[in-house]
């Protein structure tokens, strides 16, 4: 019975057809993954040219926020109207927004274009996973998922190197222009290869209101974090208004989700301790991962004096060890049949690495800094796949799909918080330290640039700026360490369940 249903739902595709589909999908994954890391080494150059040092984290946050919010909507719409149509729409939005990013003449223009680009990027990842499920039988799916994971790893590790090199030798706009040929190639391949995919016209409704409330609440909170970290500070009217709006929107979201037939965040799942603890771990882990990915290039460029190329290169061990940790963590849980000891151990490892990063100074040897980065990368990497496995192992069979989707959604939302929180801690400490030293006119990191507010005041002011910058990185990395310790406490309370031997 099961095999006949599979045959009905999954038409037989030849290996040649699958290869054509996978080639296009891999390019989509490359685009989506690359855009999360290639831009990071270019952030200081972008902020310097467009004058956005005060809110530089939004270069990353705007993309992550909209891509996260759009992902579940793409999935449902593609069930109703077909994968090919939605994927081509996502590619068109992504390519057009990339051009707008490259042509941006001001910081607000760039942030708006990045937000639109995220809407397209969310569709690329959602459709990539859905298309694989459409054309590949479950027994063979792991093989092709491995190709996508490899492409994601290549983009994650190579993105910072490419972005740094392009920023130094070409222009920061290249990190967006490169999406044009890649996107057009992916469009051509997917348009041809996906013509044979069936359109099932599935029914059901999309929780648009829930998605809008969630996105609005998160956006208000992130904007409050960003604006509150700079003068006039947390007591200003706009910041207090944003915090109030975030609370009211969150209350509205909770009330709506309790009444909604198809909620974007099903309340019944959160009643289970293992699920609520696991999504909390996923949120915190992805937050510190993206926060660190954002902070490290800034640290090496602003505090250590490296150029964009070298800062991207130095970031590679962190991302590479994160991939190694994810692979090793998955293999370890398979061998011992449990996930809790691995998650707890990984978080302890990450906390130790962050403690080291929070203590580094100008005299700390760079190889030791890289060693701390590697420890953090491995520790977070070990946790990520095992937290997802914990959710899927504990969920009832009927809830596996919903639980996985909700988990991935909240994990991505944690990524959106990561760069904003890291940037807020860095900039607010920097401004407060300078104000305490008597330099209140220096409001953002741009004051350290040649010709900036501190440079105009002389060597003593620049020295105070360097001290303030180091204090900012100490607090930012220390904040990451505190969040990992909080995640460790949550993980200790996880039930120590054995992994099921079957999928039933």
Image (cartoon, rainbow, N blue to C red):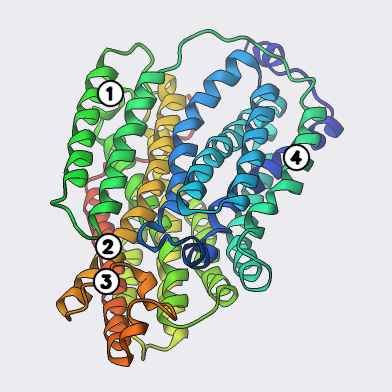
Q: Please name the residue shown 37% across and 28% down the image.
A: 395
Percent position (x, y) of residue 63?
Answer: 49, 45
Q: Please name the residue shown 26% across and 44% down the image.
A: 494
Name the element at disc 4.
Answer: helix
**Labelled disc at residue 267:** 1
Image vertical order of residue 69 relative to residue 417, above or below: above
Q: Pointer 1: residues within 10 angstroms few (<14), some, or many (20+)?
A: some
Does residue 309 appear in this view? yes
Name the element at disc 1.
Answer: helix
Percent position (x, y) of residue 190?
Answer: 76, 32
Q: Nearer the viewer, residue 449 or 182?
A: 449
User: How far is mark 2 from mark 4, CA to CA?
Assistant: 39 Å
Q: Pointer 3: residues within 10 angstroms few (<14), some, or many (20+)?
A: many
Does label 1 or label 2 sit earlier along the sequence?
A: 1
User: How far is mark 4 from mark 3, CA to CA?
Assistant: 43 Å
Disc 3 target residue: 430
Percent position (x, y) of residue 325?
Answer: 49, 60
Q: Nearer the viewer, residue 144 or 461?
A: 461
């Amino acid at each position: 019975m099961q095999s006949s249903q599979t045959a009905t739902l999954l038409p037989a595709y030849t290996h040649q057809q699958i290869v054509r589909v996978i080639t296009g999908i891999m390019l989509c994954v490359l685009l989506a993954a690359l855009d999360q890391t290639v831009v990071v080494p270019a952030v200081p150059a972008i902020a310097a040219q467009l004058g956005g040092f005060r809110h530089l984290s939004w270069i990353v946050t705007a993309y992550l926020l909209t891509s996260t919010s759009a992902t579940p909507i793409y999935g449902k719409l593609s069930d109703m109207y077909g994968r090919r149509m939605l994927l081509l729409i996502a590619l068109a939005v992504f390519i057009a927004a990339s051009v707008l990013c490259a042509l941006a003449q001001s910081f607000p223009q760039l942030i708006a274009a990045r937000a639109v680009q995220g809407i397209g990027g969310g569709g690329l990842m959602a459709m990539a996973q859905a298309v694989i499920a459409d054309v590949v039988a479950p027994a063979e799916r792991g093989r092709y998922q491995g190709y996508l994971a490899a492409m994601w790893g290549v983009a994650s590790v190579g993105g910072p190197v490419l972005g740094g090199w392009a920023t130094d030798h070409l222009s920061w706009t290249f990190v967006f222009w490169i999406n044009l040929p890649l996107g057009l190639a992916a469009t051509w391949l997917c348009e041809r290869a996906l013509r044979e995919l069936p359109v099932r016209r599935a029914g059901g409704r999309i929780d648009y209101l829930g998605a809008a409330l969630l996105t609005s609440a998160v956006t208000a909170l992130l904007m409050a974090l960003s604006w509150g970290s700079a003068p006039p500070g947390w007591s200003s009217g706009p910041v207090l208004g944003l915090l109030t709006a975030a609370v009211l929107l969150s209350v509205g979201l909770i009330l709506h989700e309790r009444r909604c037939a198809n909620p974007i965040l099903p309340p019944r799942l959160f009643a289970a301790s293992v699920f609520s603890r696991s999504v909390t771990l996923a949120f915190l882990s992805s937050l510190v991962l993206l926060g660190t990915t954002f902070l490290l290039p800034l640290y090496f460029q602003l505090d250590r004096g490296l150029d964009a190329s070298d800062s991207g290169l130095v970031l590679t061990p962190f991302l590479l060890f994160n991939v190694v940790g994810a692979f090793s963590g998955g293999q370890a849980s398979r061998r011992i049949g449990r996930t809790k000891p691995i998650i707890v151990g990984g978080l302890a490892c990450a906390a130790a690495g962050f403690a080291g990063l929070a203590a580094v100074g100008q005299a700390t040897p760079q190889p030791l800094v890289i060693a701390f980065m590697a420890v953090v990368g491995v520790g977070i990497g070990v946790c990520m796949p095992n937290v997802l496995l914990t959710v899927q192992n504990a969920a009832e069979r009927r809830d596996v799909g919903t639980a996985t989707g909700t988990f991935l959604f909240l994990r991505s939302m944690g990524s959106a918080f990561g760069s904003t929180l890291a940037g807020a801690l860095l900039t607010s400490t920097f401004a407060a330290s300078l104000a305490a030293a008597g330099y209140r006119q220096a409001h953002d990191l741009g004051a350290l640039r040649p010709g900036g507010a501190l440079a105009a005041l002389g060597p003593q002011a620049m020295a105070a700026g360097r001290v303030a910058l180091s204090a900012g990185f100490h607090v930012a990395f220390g904040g990451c360490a505190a969040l990992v310790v909080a995640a460790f406490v949550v993980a200790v309370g996880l039930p120590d369940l054995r992994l099921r031997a079957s999928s039933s």
